[in-house]
Amino acid sequence: VRVDRLELLERLLVGVALGLAYAPVHEGAFIATVLVLLILSMSVEARTVIRRMDAGTLRR
Protein backbone atom coordinates (compact mmCIF):
# COMPACT_ATOMS: atom_id res chain seq x y z
CA VAL A 1 0.00 0.00 0.00
CA ARG A 2 1.47 3.35 -1.06
CA VAL A 3 1.17 6.22 1.40
CA ASP A 4 1.96 9.68 0.08
CA ARG A 5 4.09 12.13 2.01
CA LEU A 6 1.21 14.40 2.97
CA GLU A 7 -0.74 11.53 4.53
CA LEU A 8 2.40 10.41 6.36
CA LEU A 9 2.90 13.96 7.68
CA GLU A 10 -0.73 14.07 8.84
CA ARG A 11 -0.26 10.83 10.76
CA LEU A 12 2.94 12.17 12.30
CA LEU A 13 1.25 15.41 13.37
CA VAL A 14 -1.69 13.54 14.91
CA GLY A 15 0.69 11.23 16.76
CA VAL A 16 2.73 14.11 18.15
CA ALA A 17 -0.45 15.99 19.12
CA LEU A 18 -1.78 12.97 21.01
CA GLY A 19 1.57 12.48 22.71
CA LEU A 20 1.69 16.11 23.79
CA ALA A 21 -1.91 15.98 25.00
CA TYR A 22 -1.27 13.11 27.41
CA ALA A 23 2.40 13.48 28.37
CA PRO A 24 3.48 15.93 31.05
CA VAL A 25 5.73 18.44 29.27
CA HIS A 26 7.08 21.85 30.16
CA GLU A 27 4.91 24.71 28.88
CA GLY A 28 7.72 26.28 26.87
CA ALA A 29 8.55 22.98 25.20
CA PHE A 30 4.88 22.44 24.36
CA ILE A 31 4.50 25.89 22.79
CA ALA A 32 7.75 25.57 20.85
CA THR A 33 6.76 22.15 19.54
CA VAL A 34 3.33 23.37 18.44
CA LEU A 35 4.88 26.35 16.64
CA VAL A 36 7.47 24.18 14.90
CA LEU A 37 4.78 21.73 13.78
CA LEU A 38 2.62 24.59 12.53
CA ILE A 39 5.47 26.06 10.48
CA LEU A 40 6.43 22.61 9.17
CA SER A 41 2.89 21.78 8.09
CA MET A 42 2.46 25.19 6.42
CA SER A 43 5.68 24.78 4.46
CA VAL A 44 4.69 21.28 3.31
CA GLU A 45 1.26 22.54 2.22
CA ALA A 46 2.84 25.46 0.34
CA ARG A 47 5.27 23.14 -1.43
CA THR A 48 2.41 20.83 -2.38
CA VAL A 49 0.34 23.70 -3.79
CA ILE A 50 3.30 25.11 -5.73
CA ARG A 51 4.16 21.69 -7.15
CA ARG A 52 0.55 21.12 -8.24
CA MET A 53 0.36 24.60 -9.78
CA ASP A 54 3.51 23.89 -11.80
CA ALA A 55 2.10 20.55 -12.93
CA GLY A 56 -1.28 22.10 -13.76
CA THR A 57 -3.20 19.69 -11.52
CA LEU A 58 -4.37 22.14 -8.87
CA ARG A 59 -8.14 21.90 -8.47
CA ARG A 60 -10.62 23.94 -6.50
Image (cartoon, rainbow, N blue to C red):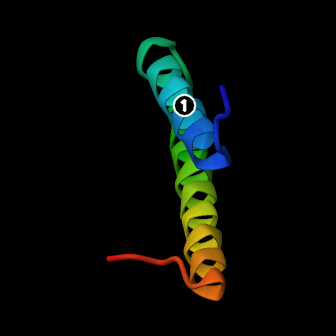
Q: Please state the horizontal and vertical placement of residue 35, each as a whole percent of the image.
A: 54, 53
Could you tell whether 15 is left or right of 59 in the image? right
Mark 1, Cα crowd under 10 Å, few <14 / some 14-19 / many 20+, is: few
Q: Is residue 31 above or below residue 44?
A: above
Looking at this view, name the residue that lies furthest to the left. 60
Q: Please state the horizontal and vertical placement of residue 4, each as a whole percent of the image.
A: 64, 44
Q: Please state the horizontal and vertical placement of residue 16, each as a whole percent of the image.
A: 56, 28
Could you tell whether 60 is left or right of 56 in the image? left
Q: Quadrant of the N terminus?
A: top right
Number of marks drawn: 1
Could you tell whether 22 is left or right of 50 in the image? left
Please name the residue shown 53% across and 24% down the image. Answer: 15
Q: Please state the horizontal and vertical placement of residue 48, each as a whole percent of the image.
A: 60, 68
Q: Is residue 59 above or below residue 22?
A: below
Residue position marked by numbered label 1 in the rendering: 11
Callout 1 amino acid: Arg
Q: Quadrant of the C terminus?
A: bottom left
Q: Is residue 40 above or below residue 17?
A: below
Please name the residue shown 60% across and 32% down the image. Answer: 12
Q: Nearer the viewer, residue 3 or 24?
A: 3
Q: Is residue 11 above or below residue 36?
A: above
Please name the residue shown 62% across and 52% down the image. Answer: 36
Mark 1 residue element? helix
